[in-house]
Image (spheres, grey):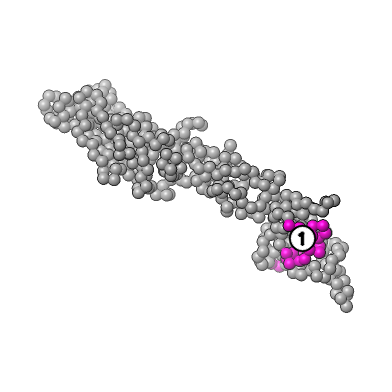
Amino acid sequence: MLLIVVMFAVNSLVAFGGGNQCFQQDDLPNMFKNLEFIHPPFKSVTSLGPIDCARQCKLHTLCYFVNFNIETLNCSLISDTGDYSRLNPVSVMIYVKSWNENILRTCKNHQCPNNTVCKENNSGFDCQPIGCTGIPQVPNINVTSFTSKVLWDFNEVVEYACIRGRFAATNVTCTSNGFWSNVDCIQYTKCSNTRICSEMQSKDFWLYLSTFNSRRKVFCSFTGISNAAMYISLPEYNTASTPIYTRNGTSCELIEATDPSTFSMGYTDFKKIRNIISGKIKTTGRMYANSSFSLQDYGRAGDCYAGNDSDVCGVIGHFIIDLRGTGFKINSTAKWKTWGTDGVIQNITWSDDGRVIEGFCGGNCGGCEPDGELVLEADYTDQPANDSAELPICKFPLR
């Protein structure tokens, strides 16, 4: 009676399997006609029939299910362990993990890695790579990207290999030996880094600046293929002036200068200031500054109005440094000195939080300017909003 049942099973499988395969009855649990498992395969092969399809699955440690098409003899190897299926009149769905090892020969009970297939040879078997699986053991790797596929094909490139804020200098690919190519997730630390994976864009970014040991919001300005400069966007009013007025004698009446350019008189409002990567401000330069008459330097003020006795009418040269909302402030060691003829510092005040510095200076065509470089420090209690700048992410290197 047992033989009749087995022969019936064989004939049935041959009828919809398109092949003549021998098997034991206990090799056939969890085989379902007219059903298919709903999940993309990690590999598809042509097989002799459902038993050969199951055997192909058993040769791959990664395989749990197969969908066998009785018309095309296509065998889809599936790694998922879920239970989602649908009707398909030309499909046989098999949960192969529940089968024993009897359908294998030399490869029986092999323990090949997930990214290999067991292949018989004269000495037994070996495990041949079929692609890449797993996640490179590298800090700041983007786990989601590497787990988006069960098996990656040889030479396939992983997009977004590193987490946001870091980039891979070269494409991360699956090599022919089944291992990932070398990858290092590098911090975005300078403006030129932002164009490794993207087209040049002049905009605000969050970059890691080693001087401050933290990410800072900076504006990257590109003026050519190789020219990249770092600025700080100024949300508040910043200005410097040497007003275009003089006076006569003891009178305090403002008299407009006949030729303001002679003494570099003018007014400049600053939208951005140049941040040298060492954490110092470049006070000169006309980029992102609006000027009337002569361009003024950042943090500098003067006049030709006060004369040689500023006590008579005071001074009218004026500067404002206001770094509120930038995440920076001027180091408290900053000092100012006089310049020109009879230069005088009437008053320089700092706000209690150190974010705003305002000065009034003048002279007989003189005034005040920073004594040395203006050094920045990070202001961790006045950070710009996260969405006010882009934290760059690398899809893949363009070059």
The quarter of the rendered structure image containing the C terminus is top right
Residue 277 to residue 137: above or below: above
- Judge by depth and name the residue closer to the eye, 1 or 316: 1
Q: Which residue is drawn at 74% across and 69% down?
A: 30
| Residue 106 in magenta stretch | yes
Bin the neighbour count of mark 1 within 10 Å (Cα to Cα): few under 14, some 14-19, many 20 and up.
few
* Residue 263 on the magenta span: no
Q: Is 259 positioned to the left or the right of 285 in the image?
A: left
* Number of marks present in the image shown: 1
Q: Residue placed at 24% from the left, 24% from the top?
A: 340
> What is the quadrant of residue 246 in the picture?
top left
Q: Which of 213 and 56 is in front in this view?
A: 213
x 58%, y 47%: residue: 138
The answer to whether any part of residue 325 appears in the image is yes
Q: Is residue 163 left or right of residue 252?
A: right
- Quarter residue 270 falls in: top left
Residue 135 screen position, x and y as percent: 61, 51
Judge from the rendering whether residue 71 lies leftward or rightward of residue 159; answer left or right: right
Q: Name the residue under label 1.
A: 109
Counting from the top left corner in percent of width and height, residue 131 is at: 70, 49
Q: Look at label 1 and name its amino acid.
A: Asn
Q: Quadrant of residue 71?
A: bottom right
Residue at image x 85%, y 51%?
122
Quarter of the figure with the N terminus = bottom right
Magenta residues, start to end = 86-111
The x, y position of residue 379, in whole percent, is 35, 45
Query: Is residue 260 visible in this depiction of the protein?
Result: no
